[in-house]
Image (cartoon, grey):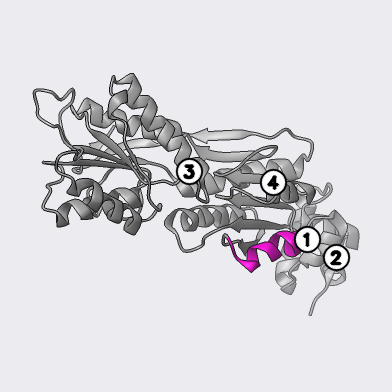
Amino acid sequence: MSGIADVARRAGVSKATASRALTGHGYVSAETRTRVQDAARALGYVASSNAASLVTGRTRNIGVIMPYLNRWFFAEVLEGIQDALLEHGLDLTLYDARPGTVGRTRIFEDFLARKRFDGLIAVGLEPENRELERLLSIGRPLVSVVGDARDSSAVSIDDDHAARRATEHLIGLGHRRIAFVGGNVGAHWAEVDRRRLRGYEAAMTTGGLGDEVRHMSSEVTLPGGYAVSVDLLGDAARRPTGIVGVCDEVAIGAIIAARRLGIQVPGDLSVVGIDDHEFAEMFALTTLAQDPREQGAAAVALLLQHVSDPDSKPVELTLRARLIVRSSTGPVDRASSAIEAGTGSR
């Protein structure tokens, strides 16, 4: 197997110059870099990441910690992170920190402390038991995607705006009895639920519907949205004409509940969600679309800035969701509606 000395000899340079040319650390002329890279290819030489780490003090590895791997949002964010890291030739170490597990405790108390990464991306975490302090005390750059972002850079969508825009869409269609379904302010990842509930309440109050505010708490899942909506929609006397789901999965659960109760969507009930989940198009769900892959890529870009400049200040990047109108929403009646029902995006 060829080594760095063989590459240097073939390219006619010193071992130090060959190392700089292959690792990208230190100045080497473009002509020399090309000559060294050509020699490495001809010899089938691959630079050792361990050797490069000894020279630069960096692992060229990024740690990613998230509470769920099998949920749509987290899987999409992870793909965005991985694609961005691959573009930069960086490795990824994934930590599955499921809430309430022994594994999560070991990750925070043991594995992360080993510092086998240049920086860390925490996705959807609301650290408890001083977990955030532990992450910051590791001494590596940290970027959060959603969740708690104190003292670190963060990427998220404007959840308040998304829920406000979803509610305003229904108000514009003439709806007054609008319920907010899903979310549990005492549960894991509750800050997102709180922000979205706050946006709904603000839109209702601004629209003169403060007395109509109604929140039905549920698990942030499709079955959770279904179970609560069966109870909500089964009460004919107080049945809402519009539902804002805390996320698309909850909203889809509400649509399934309505169908099983013989309630037409959108004839009798309009439903809007937040996310643009992979199932949203299947259920013709009107939604506020976010792009989790974009958030993952943005987190990588922020983290690499901090790796290059450890003294750079934290940055909070807030993205706005986009309203996509499908056929799960429509006017109460055309006389009271401020806009026409339709499909497409706005």
Q: Quadrant of the C terminus?
A: top left
Q: Please state which of residues 52 and 222 is positioned toward the viewer in this rendering.
A: 222
Q: Quadrant of the N terminus?
A: bottom right
Identify the residue under disc 2: 8
Q: Please state which of residues 268 and 60 is positioned toward the viewer in this rendering.
A: 268
Where is residue 77? Give x, y as percent: 51, 52
Where is residue 29? Give x, y as percent: 80, 47
Of callouts 2 and 1, the N-terminal one: 2
Compared to 87, does 199 lie above or below? above
Identify the residue under disc 1: 36
Estimate the spatial distance between the alpha carbons at disc 2 and disc 3, rounded to whole Å: 61 Å
Identify the residue under disc 3: 185
Mark 2: amino acid: Ala
Estimate the spatial distance between the alpha carbons at disc 4 and disc 3, rounded to whole Å: 26 Å
Of callouts 4 and 3, the N-terminal one: 4
Question: Mark 1, residues whose alpha carbon is within 10 Å: few (<14), some, or many (≥20)?
Answer: many
